Amino acid sequence: MNNLKQLLFLSALILLVSCAIKEENPRWVINEVMVDNQTGFMDNYGQRNGWIEIFNNTYKTQDLGGRYLTDDPNNPKKYPIPRGDVLTKIPPRQHALFWADNEPFNGTFHVNFKLDSSKDNYIALYENDGKTLLDEIVIPAGLPADKTYGYPADGVKYDQNGNTLATQLERITPSSNNAILEENPKVVSLQKNDPIGVTITITSMLVVFLGLILLYLIFKAIGNTAKNISQRRIASAGTLSAVRGESQLTGEVLAAISAAIHELNQDVHDVESTILTISEVRRKYSPWNSKFYALRQEPRK
Amino acid sequence: MNTLLTLGDNLKTFWDYTGMANATFGHIIMILVGLFFIYLAISKEYEPLLLIPIGFGILIGNIPFNEAAGLQVGIYEEGSVFNILYQGVVQGWYPPLIFMGIGAMTDFSSLIANPKLFLIGAACQFGIFGAYIAALMWGFAPNEAGSIGIIGGADGPTAIFLTSKLAPQLLGAVAISAYSYMALVPVIQPPFMKLLTTKKERVIKMKTPRVVSQTEKILFPIVGLLLTTFLVPSGLPLLGMLFFGNLLKESGVTRRLAETARGPLIDTITILLGLTVGASTQATTFLRPESIKIFVIGAFSFVVATCAGILFVKFFNLFLKKDNKINPLIGNSGVSAVPDSARISQIVGLEYDNTNYLLMHAMGPNVAGVIGSAVAAGIMLGFLY
């Protein structure tokens, strides 16, 4: 029982510690930003301006409509993203691109501010209430023209130690993945590092055994506790079952003993009027109780 | 004359649309395979609940038709009835529903009463990873090897679920292979069970399992879910539904729901799953050298899983007290073909001692195998998806 308590305590502790140190990536990520666009991507009006790419960092479609984009920490509601535009419904793990051209009447994806490469640019995305911060980023001053700042892998803001991964990016990828996924990186890595699958086999078998050993230990402890409780209950009840609880006899033997005792206790037929017997019993014939008359006669050939 | 020409053209067009005009050698082979499955199901009674839908599905999937005409009748044609039904396989939502039914019909008492049998269920998962290594060595990519390896778990829904995620192009071959070998468990396992055990071991009588309280039965799905899915969250769809179904059964207050899950619901899904998996074996996509390789590796994986279970019991017995030994004939049942492999333990056990009933003992590793293979699938998904 003590072992079980220790095991449960240890599991809870590991769980709490792992929860506490985990820095979570937000649902929306300001994924890539270009401040000074000289020769790059143009909007539908043929103009080049800075742009802000927002990434839906979930596996469900989310709507950006009604949320707020801002470059001013004191004015979170600076640009309300229009509601009701089907284009603001961003599919899972996809991007939306906003032009920082200070031309909000050019369409949903044109915000009412511009970015300035000579100073730090603060950009934030706020929830519909205008108070809950969804994500923010600061683009350091002096970002070269036609270069972008953001995260090397889409939606991954922090490394394992909780440090931010924001950096100047090598490739400019508006409305597409920052890291180009040509192949499954896990598969490529396994092909390179574990070509015949021995490592993955050992790891996986260890995990399978660990899982089932934990189940074994827990249910062994639960079983022992349940046995102790039931034995105590039976013993205090003082019934015949108590014998079973105390003895090492198998179920079959106990069943046979119980049946024999039951038969002995019930063997009082000599004082009863109806007796189950193998002796011949004579009864007077009466047509009223004869089944013969109720049956159809078998046809004779 | 014109009428005759038009009639001729019409007949030619009609002919172009017939099965005869579009039949290939592959279609004929697959139709024969389908008929063979139906024969096995009816005549030999090998897994009829699966082989009848799959066998008939193979016939449906291999009726030749003019694919260029866009008739929307084939299983791979978007919008066709069969394609809509097939989405349950492709999107992977039939297998978890089947797992819910399995949970609602499975009594885990023998496992709870003797929890060390969990370890046999774990040992048998060597079949999965043995096949994974074999597939890699035979030139398959890791994600394809993972899908092929899961055949060794002897669990059709798990195999379909994992393959639909990792290598959908192999779905037909993996599913057919998994279900075929599950049906052939009575043929595959006994020779290895006899080969790897001595006469003395085969007559070991195991202790009668203790009676399990209702509280323990209720705790099992809750603890099982929390523990296994915290360890392998990617196994959540299968493990979550398995344990949910079991809680419906054991809670004692949701009898109607449990009866639906283990009755009409699982039957409906089994019909749809079997039929569409069978139909997915359209000759043009199914008959490839890879399919034959998958069948060979699938057989190998079943053999490895069976042997691993038996050898593990023999090894485990070295550490157990004399009156607490496990009969190695239940080692095979750690593969999760429920309840066929447990039945094989019983049948082979009775051959050597007609008073030694192993069925209840074998059900322990058998259901542990279900959990083990779902955990293994979750691990594969985590590593390869």
Image (cartoon, rainbow, N blue to C red):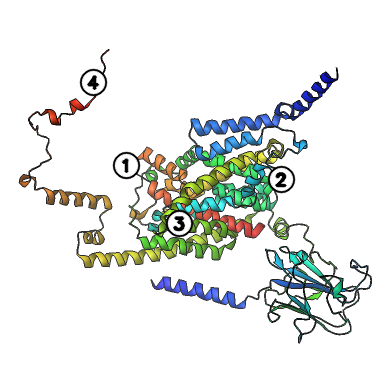
Query: Which image quadrant is residue B52 in?
Result: top right
Q: Is residue A140 above or below residue B3?
A: below
Residue under label 4 = A297
Q: Nearer the viewer, residue B245 or B143?
A: B245
The kind of secondary structure element at disc 4 is: loop
Residue under label 3 = B246
Q: Nearer the viewer, residue A79 or A238?
A: A79
* Residues marked 1 and 4 touching at CB (< 8 Å): no
Q: Position of residue B116 (x, y in %)?
A: 42, 58
Q: Position of residue A240 (x, y in %)?
A: 20, 59
Q: CA distance from mark 1 to mark 4?
A: 48 Å
B175 lies left or right of B251? right
Whether residue B31 appears in this view of the structure is yes
**Neighbours of disc 2 within 10 Å: few (<14), some (14-19), many (20+):** few
**Neighbours of disc 4 within 10 Å: few (<14), some (14-19), many (20+):** few
Kind of residue indicated by mark 4:
Gln
The kind of secondary structure element at disc 1 is: loop
Q: Position of residue A84 (x, y in %)?
A: 75, 67
- Which residue is at a point 68% across and 77% down the rendered structure image? A162
* Residues marked 4 and 2 touching at CB (< 8 Å): no
Kind of residue indicated by mark 2:
Glu
Mark 1 vs mark 4: give the one in front.
4
Chain bearing mark 3: B
Residue under label 2 = B78
A237 lies left or right of B158? left
Q: CA distance from mark 3 to mark 2?
A: 36 Å
Residue under label 1 = B355
Mark 3 vs mark 1: give the one in front.
3
**Neighbours of disc 1 within 10 Å: few (<14), some (14-19), many (20+):** few
Q: Residue furthest top?
A: A301
- Which residue is at a point 41% across and 43% down the rendered structure image? B198
N-terminal of the pair, mark 1 or mark 2, is 2
